[in-house]
């Protein structure tokens, strides 16, 4: 996995014992209270640890009452008493991460079990730097042009999300990484994730936003859309009221406006009618757009999604638009993903079906059966869930009702294997449809394959942007 809990330098000696520095293997910062059921073992034996927070030692069970946040680039420091002998040790850490913006059912948020087992060498505490380097100026190079013969109302961008594994490694600050997308000439405009670039998330401070804006402007770039979060759950047992949800969202809206972004992005249908109506005057006052992103296996055949579309059509508000992620339009699965499942021990007969008949209803039924029968190897269980969530089977024709409301597109890609147009065909298809409907907005290269591919984000994104421009230009010519 490209998002590890334990880095090479995670285990260190201290004056009274040892410390284990745990990475947050997620795409954004999370509440400390989201960490539950934390356990550590060393060399096969459970060990008692406390979490060190701002100089305080906090019992793992007490994290549920902590008001603070785990910034994506920080390490959660777990301290144990008792000296470890020099050399390598078999370390295991596990916890459940409660994801407050993802619903698992009617009764609560998603609770995701996470575990890592690694042999780690014991290092001296003084030799391990656990903070990202300070922000530094990024030398500006000529950014890749937005693109060829595309309509002037189309903006082609790159998502800083593509660099998530590097953000988690924390060898550079998150803001350096995002600004480097522009400074290193990958793209002139970028999408960013609020929960990645700002330590003060979910209430970004004016000072932190201003510094980011000034540095990005100096590099010659701008932000198109800010990926926001709407944490519906204040705790695993208490859902926020609509007024509380609005209060959680508004600081992110203000930060986007201060940054000069077009707007913020949230999941399709998550806001709901009451919150949308509460947010409308704020959106108009700030001059920003709320983009509702539809992706993966979401479809308008689902009653809740159809009802949300009807709501957006009824509101007919230019400050509330749709963003389509073309993960909905996958003609086949990424070969690199199937290979990862194969290495993880997934059944060969299912893999063959996934490879040759991805869109067949029988394939979906086989995926469900494999999961229910407990035949998914634990090492790839989380990865396997992409088959039910992130990989879609729709056609462009299915999206026609969304197109008049669409002002953003994620050109999602997983790898660059374009055999039989696996990558380029959905881009060309959506491009032709957008051309017919007079689309004006952003089209953003977003890489999701870093979950299993260890590849250079800049190299992958540059290649994908070039491929996308060719596919979109072809779509313009055909339309």
Image (cartoon, grey):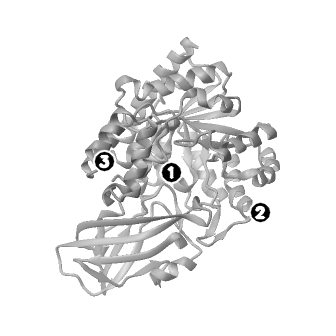
Callout 2 environment at 10 Å: few (<14), some (14 to 19), or many (20+)?
Answer: few
Q: Examine the image and state in which quarter residue 170 appears.
A: bottom left
Q: Examine the image and state in which quarter residue 139 appears.
A: top left
What residue is shown with label 1? 175
What residue is shown with label 2? 243
Q: Examine the image and state in which quarter residue 291 appears.
A: top right
Q: Earlier in the sequence, mark 3 or mark 1?
A: 1
- Front-most of residues 189 and 39: 39
Q: Secondary structure at mark 3?
A: helix
Residue 420: x percent and y percent? 37, 23
- Front-most of residues 305 and 101: 305
**Mark drawn on residue 469:** none
The reply to whether the C-beta atoms of the residues labelled 3 and 1 are less than 8 Å apart is: no
Distance of mark 3 from mark 1, alpha carbons? 33 Å
Quarter of the figure that contains the C terminus? top right
Q: Residue at x 40, y 28 (%)?
A: 422
Q: Secondary structure at mark 1?
A: helix
Total labels: the figure holds 3
Residue 69 appears left or right of 141: right
Distance of mark 2 from mark 1, alpha carbons? 31 Å
Q: Earlier in the sequence, mark 2 or mark 1?
A: 1
Residue 423: x percent and y percent? 42, 29
The relative height of residue 340 versus residue 39 in the rendered view (above or below) is: above
The relative height of residue 247 versus residue 333 in the rendered view (above or below) is: below
**Mark drawn on residue 341:** 3
- Front-most of residues 468 and 236: 236
Q: Secondary structure at mark 2?
A: helix
Q: Residue at x 43, y 50 (%)?
A: 368
């Amino acid at each position: 996995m490209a998002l590890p809990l334990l880095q090479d330098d995670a285990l260190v000696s201290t004056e009274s014992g040892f410390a284990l520095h745990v990475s947050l293997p997620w795409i954004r910062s999370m509440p400390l209270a989201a960490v539950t059921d934390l356990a550590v073992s060393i060399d096969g034996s459970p060990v008692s640890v406390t979490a060190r927070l701002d100089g305080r030692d906090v019992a793992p069970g007490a994290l549920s009452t902590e008001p603070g946040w785990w910034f994506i680039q920080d390490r959660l420091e777990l301290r144990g008493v008792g000296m470890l002998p020099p050399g390598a040790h078999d370390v295991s850490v596990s916890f459940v991460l409660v994801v407050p913006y993802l619903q698992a059912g009617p009764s609560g948020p998603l609770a995701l079990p996470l575990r890592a087992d690694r042999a780690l060498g014991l290092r001296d505490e003084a030799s391990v730097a656990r903070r990202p380097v300070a922000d530094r100026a990024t030398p500006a190079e000529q950014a890749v042009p937005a693109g060829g013969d595309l309509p002037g109302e189309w903006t082609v961008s790159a998502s800083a999300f593509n660099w998530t594994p590097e953000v988690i490694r924390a060898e550079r600050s998150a803001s350096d990484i995002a600004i480097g997308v522009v400074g290193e000439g990958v793209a002139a405009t970028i999408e960013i994730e609020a929960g990645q670039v700002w330590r003060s998330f979910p209430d970004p401070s004016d000072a932190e936003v201003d510094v980011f804006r000034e540095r990005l402007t100096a590099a010659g770039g701008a932000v198109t859309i800010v990926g926001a979060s709407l944490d519906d759950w204040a705790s695993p047992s208490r859902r926020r009221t609509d007024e509380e949800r609005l209060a959680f969202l508004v600081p992110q809206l203000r930060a986007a406006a201060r940054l000069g972004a077009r707007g913020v992005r949230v999941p399709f249908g998550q806001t709901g009618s009451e919150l949308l109506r509460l947010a409308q005057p704020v959106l108009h006052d700030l001059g920003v757009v709320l983009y509702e992103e539809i992706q993966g296996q979401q479809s308008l055949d689902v009653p809740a999604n159809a009802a949300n579309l009807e709501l957006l059509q009824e509101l007919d508000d230019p400050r509330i638009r749709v963003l389509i992620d073309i993960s909905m339009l996958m003609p086949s699965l990424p070969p690199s993903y199937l290979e990862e499942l194969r290495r993880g021990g997934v059944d060969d007969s299912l893999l063959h079906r996934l490879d040759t008949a991805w869109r067949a209803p029988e394939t979906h039924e086989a995926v469900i059966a494999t999961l229910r029968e407990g035949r998914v190897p634990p090492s790839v269980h989380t990865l396997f869930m992409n088959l039910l969530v992130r990989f879609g089977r729709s056609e462009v024709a299915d999206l026609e009702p969304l197109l008049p409301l669409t002002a953003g597109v994620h050109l999602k890609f997983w790898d660059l294997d374009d055999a039989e147009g696996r990558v380029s065909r959905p881009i060309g298809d959506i491009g032709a449809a957008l051309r017919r409907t007079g689309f004006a907005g952003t089209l953003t290269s977003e890489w999701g394959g870093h979950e299993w591919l260890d590849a250079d984000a800049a190299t992958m994104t540059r290649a994908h942007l070039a491929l996308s421009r060719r596919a979109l230009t072809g779509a313009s010519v055909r339309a």
